[in-house]
Image (cartoon, rainbow, N blue to C red):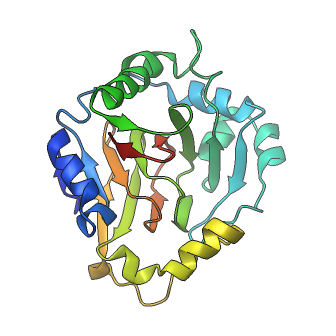
Amino acid sequence: MQSDLEPITTWETFRHRYEDPEQGRIACRLGGEVFPFGLPPVDPLQLLSEARDNPKARILRQAPGNTVDLKADFSQEIRAMPLGQVAREPHLHLSIFDLSDLRQPGRSLHRLSEEVIRPFERLCQERGVRWEGDFWPILFMGGSASATNYHIDPTPNAIFHLFGAKRFHSLKQPDAWCPQSVKDAYLNDKKLAVRPEGIRAEDCLVHDNAPGDLVWIPRLSPHWVDAGSLSATITFAFRQFRFE
């Protein structure tokens, strides 16, 4: 298991890092008092079944490449397959941006909601973290050979790994590879970032996700993820993140 990401275990360190103009641009791992939560059991097939049947699910076919393909709709095929076949579909890429249904009693993410999502929201508030709108957990599930290809996000994100094998990649000098013109094109024109040529292994920070890991990704910092098995993560997206 490889991890090049610096572990951040105190709120003081996290705040100083976030406010640092250089270090604050680089991905890291959060743990210790910043994220003192265990991982309650999540049934992969129950989650997959409920997520696949959720009418709000975005279901794509995503193979490794240089950018995310939002036009590769795979929903009809996936919803027509037996569940076991869906679990074996290598390029499945499923996301749900509203988890209210899956967090209800008896549903696959209810215990996670009660033991991790709600307590993490309270802890962030207690420690002076502020954001706009609701606390926003997002589900991502991927097949064994799927990828969330090179991209940037409009919010800083904390990615909580539930199960399966996923290798996370970020950059040691993210802004050198992603100039302001690329960020502006994404924010203003919704033009997706494309992985530039020339990125070498020594330019990257790699982290092999283990269940219970939480990875912090700064806003507009390029990253990509390759799956090695059926896997799932919860991304906490913070709109207008700030410390009070």
Q: State the image quarter where residue 61 is shown.
A: bottom right
Q: Where is residue 215 in the image (x, y as percent from the top left)?
A: 33, 49
Left or right, 141 with respect to 76, comes to: left
Left or right, 37 with respect to 135, comes to: left
Residue occupying image coordinates x 77% and y 52%: 74
Could you tell me if residue 39 is visible in this image?
no
Q: Quadrant of the N terminus?
A: bottom left
Residue occupying image coordinates x 33% and y 31%: 124
Q: Where is residue 158 in the image (x, y as percent from the top left)?
A: 39, 45
Residue occupying image coordinates x 47% and y 49%: 229
Q: Quadrant of the C terminus?
A: top left
Which residue occupies the foreground of this view, 16 or 27? 16
Q: State the image quarter where residue 162 is shown.
A: top left
Outermost bottom residue: 198
Outermost top residue: 105
Q: State the image quarter where residue 126 is shown.
A: top left
Which residue occupies the foreground of this view, 232 or 229? 232
Which residue occupies the foreground of this view, 71 or 47? 71
Counting the numbered discs, the total is: 0
Could you tell me if residue 139 is visible in this image?
yes
Q: Where is residue 62 in the image (x, y as percent from the top left)?
A: 64, 61
Q: In this view, does 130 lie above or below 199?
A: above
Left or right, 114 with respect to 89, comes to: left
Q: Where is residue 120 in the image (x, y as percent from the top left)?
A: 36, 27
Which residue occupies the foreground of this view, 11 or 217? 11
Q: Is residue 172 above or below residue 89?
A: below
Q: In this view, does 87 lie above or below 49?
A: below
Residue occupying image coordinates x 53% and y 59%: 153
